[in-house]
Image: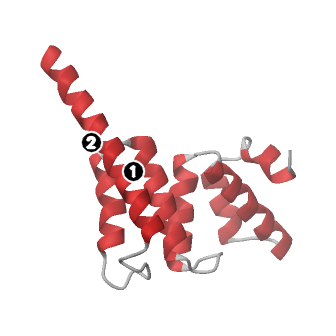
Amino acid sequence: RSPAAQLAGNMSTREIMAILEHPNSDQQRNQALAILKTKALQHDEDAMQVMAYFYHQGKHVERNPKQALYYLIAVAKQKLDEDSFNTAMDFFAEPGNGIHPEDKEAEQWLLELASRYDQATTQAASQAEMT
């Protein structure tokens, strides 16, 4: 395992953010960012939301709206709640977001999210009817 992967389980996203806001060196900033990315890849919701924000704003990373959308969708798939679903959909629909409206890969991500969300809400409604 990489050093970032080893530290990812030991540091909270809040601790990583504190380092990123006031790093002692470029090396420390880069290491904190690597740990945050590792946590996001390990499906840590807080880390994924922070990475979505960073990619959207171009903060600590090169601005990449499509990568921001990827992380928003990943959070929504994990949480399967209305707020997360709407955040991802609204971001994609936002004019000037930097994502081409006919981007087939982004469209596929959103279709998969919509399908999962529909299944989850249908299942929740069925369970509610049984009680």
| Residue at x 81% of width, y 71% of height | 24
Indicate the position of residue 19 as horizontal and vertical percent values: 71, 64
Which quadrant, please, contains the C terminus? top left
**Amino acid type of the residue tagged 1 in the rendering:** Glu
Instruction: List the single residue furthest toward the left.
Output: 129
Q: Gap between marks 1 and 2, in whole Å? A: 10 Å
| Residue at x 61% of width, y 53% of height | 40
- Asked if 102 appears above or below 9 in the picture, the reply is below
**Amino acid type of the residue tagged 2 in the rendering:** Asp
| Residue at x 43% of width, y 46% of height | 77
- Asked if 122 appears above or below 98 in the picture, the reply is above
Quick check: marks 1 and 2 in contact, CB under 8 Å? no
Looking at the image, residue 86 sits to the left or right of residue 60; the answer is: left
Q: Residues within 10 Å of mark 1 (few under 14, many from 20)?
A: some
Q: Identify the residue under disc 1.
A: 112
Q: Please indicate, yes or no, whether residue 119 appears anywhere in the rendered image.
A: yes
Q: Quadrant of residue 128?
A: top left
Looking at the image, residue 108 sits to the left or right of residue 9; the answer is: left
Indicate the position of residue 67 as horizontal and vertical percent values: 54, 68
Which quadrant, please, contains the N terminus? top right
* Disc 2, SS: helix
Looking at the image, residue 88 sits to the left or right of residue 25; the answer is: left
- Asked if 119 appears above or below 93 in the picture, the reply is above
Indicate the position of residue 9 as horizontal and vertical percent values: 72, 41
Q: Please indicate, yes or no, whether residue 53 appears anywhere in the rendered image.
A: no
Q: Label for residue 118?
A: 2
